[in-house]
Image (tube, helix red, strand yellow):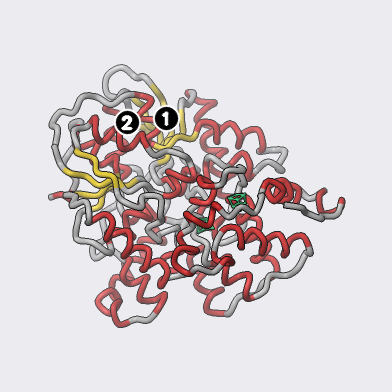
Amino acid sequence: MQTHFSAAQLAQADIEESNRILRKCVHCGFCNATCPTFLLIGDELDGPRGRIYLIKDMIENDRPATEKVVRHIDRCLSCLACMTTCPSGVHYMHLIDHGRRHIEKTYRRPLADRMLRDFFAWVMPDPARFRRMMALARLAKPLASLLPGRLGAMGRLTPGKLPAPGVTETPRVFPAEGRRQKRVALLAGCVQQALDPAINDATVRLLTRHGCEVTVSAGAGCCGSLTHHLGRDALAFARANVDAWMGELDRGGLDAVIVNASGCGTTVKDYGFMLREDPAYAAKAAKIASLARDVSEFMAALGLKAPANPPGMRVAYHSACSLQHGQRIHAQPKQLLAQAGFEVLDVPEGHICCGSAGTYNMLQPALAETLRARKVKAIESVKPQAIAAGNIGCIAQIASGTGIPVLHTVELLDWATGGPKPAALA
Ligand code: SF4
Ligand code: SF4
């Protein structure tokens, strides 16, 4: 694609990067074929190629975002299926991130939209605050089916029961069982800790059982991805995590930074890019990004113990977009589940998003619920006894549309190798 940025524009790092991305696009439109919003809406501007043109026009002409541009960009899930499909290597993720920042700078959203986005950016990165808000939201849950639009979606996604805090709520070190083979830092995260602390508990048991010392570091917290995808500055989150994990590197060395929510993993792996312009952090952030591993990626490389109790259960594996498209990890979780004694079922249309996408299912409830219904239908067609996924957003989204238990992959691996039976299967 031809671009016409001025020399002054190209002196800005964001624009220089977007120019490089845009010039790779050859307009072929292959990406539209796997785009969930293009599939549902059928409008060129609701597919990746159309959004690329909208972003190009906006930033090349230094135009403020219009209502029309915002509508089409907001409908993008950032599922990154288009990146997997693109034959030219267009880095859509960095381009849409730039587009969202431009929108945030130049467009004044309607008051209700602004307030909701401010609320998400304030509540979600803090597990204690998020837990308090969920306690309040539970009171409105019985009315969820009567509430319209975004309010109804939030009510439906609020869990019926609030779990007690898990073992990673405060910083600590979990010693390896037997001889220590690895030392890893676990990103305890934010929303996941409050919604389903059993995932971190199972992750710690699985890793320590496999000879890893696991540290939950003081100062590490939300990865910043929820804020980042709202188009806001998430660099303070990234810097705090980089500082915390560099401290671990200096103290006892670190073999990996383990992330068990793939939406977060995609962001942590991008820290080097996000902080590339900060001379004090660029090198450290690149180092941390190079250590980041999804828990399934790490366990596949480490090797899973033979299952203590092969469960022989039929498990449908839902491949979270952030894992399969964002991190290109697809085979490892399925291989681990099969090694652990589960019968792993592929889900038809596995490349299509479930509609979760961070805060998308609350900001775009109609599209998100259509995608969820499509995903649940595809999953139920293979008649599983349980559903496994590697991202808390997908787990909550799919669980709100089916009676089949939905678990994190690590909960099943932990159970098979000697951990307790997950509560969701009780
Ligand atoms: S990220 Fe997903 S929703 Fe957005 S343009 Fe790409 S394929 Fe479509
Ligand atoms: S597939 Fe890639 S090159 Fe083709 S239109 Fe989409 S982004 Fe551009």
Q: Is mark 1 within 8 Å of ligand 1?
A: no
The x, y position of residue 170, in whole percent, is 38, 44
The answer to whether marks 1 and 2 mark residues whose Cβ atoms lie closer than 8 Å is yes
Position of 283 relative to 273 (above/below) = above
The x, y position of residue 32, in whole percent, is 53, 57
Horizontally, residue 96 falls left or right of residue 33, namely right
Instruction: Compare residues 97 and 30 and report the one nearer the observer.
Output: 30
Q: Which residue is mark 1?
A: 184
Q: Which residue is mark 2?
A: 207
Looking at the rendered structure, the kind of residue marked 2 is: Leu
Q: Residue at x 37, y 68 (%)?
A: 370
Position of 351 relative to 42 (above/below) = above
Q: Is residue 166 visible?
A: no
Label 1's element? Answer: strand
- The picture quadrant where one finds residue 309 is top left
Q: Residue at x 66, y 56 (%)?
A: 98
Q: Residue at x 38, y 55 (%)?
A: 393
